[in-house]
Amino acid sequence: MADATLEPRLAALAIHPTGALWGRGELDTRDAARELEAEQTARFPIFCAGLEKQGLKQERRALRIQVGEVGFEVLDEATLRLAFTLPPGSYATRYFWSSWERLRPNLCQCSKQLLHIGGGMRCR
């Protein structure tokens, strides 16, 4: 049975679910979570063996992040400045790509001009 304090702590973003970063060592999970992670890694034995051969060790990474201070500014017809803060260990590119579809309609409404953001994404 799960600790009754977990749900409020998860909702408050005080703790986060994690995922395995494969490497040498044992999975740090138990019960159903361990079984699920073992099943997934068993699907990619060559990949897992390669990570272990490179000397990586079992680690975990949060599967969600708390993003702060999100904003953008249209500088001119072809330039958009996007700003946000992320906690240490987070990847800005991952946040951006996962948010692009949600952000795009709002960005395009702010400027009827062509917006170009790295990678060839355009709004019309």
Image (spheres, rainbow, N blue to C red):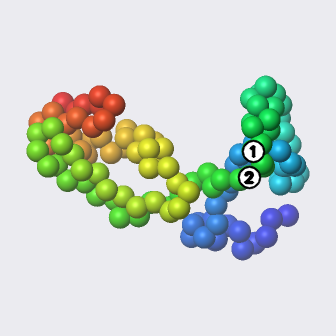
Q: How many marks?
A: 2
The image quarter containing residue 18 is bottom right
Left or right of 76? Residue 5 is: right
Residue 109 shows in this picture: no
Percent across and percent down for residue 37 are 79, 42
Residue pictured at 46% horizontal, 60% vertical: 86
Q: Residues within 10 Å of mark 1 (few under 14, many from 20)?
A: some
Residue 35: mark: none
Indicate the quadrant containing the N terminus: top left, top right, bottom left or bottom right: bottom right
The image quarter containing residue 5 is bottom right
Residue 56: mark: 1
The image quarter containing residue 38 is top right
Residue pictured at 86% horizontal, 43% vertical: 35
Residue pictured at 50% horizontal, 62% vertical: 87
Q: Nearer the viewer, mark 2 or mark 1?
A: 1
- Marks 2 and 1: CB-CB under 8 Å? yes
28 vs 1: above or below? above
Residue pictured at 16% horizontal, 49% vertical: 74
Q: Nearer the viewer, residue 15 or 118?
A: 118
Percent across and percent down for residue 102 are 37, 43
Determine the secondary structure under disc 1.
Answer: loop
Q: Nearer the viewer, residue 69 or 58?
A: 58
23 vs 90: above or below? above
Residue 59: mark: 2
Percent across and percent down for residue 83 are 31, 56
Kind of residue sitting beneath label 1: Leu
Kind of residue sitting beneath label 2: Glu
Q: Residues within 10 Å of mark 2 (few under 14, many from 20)?
A: some
Q: Nearer the viewer, residue 46 or 5?
A: 46
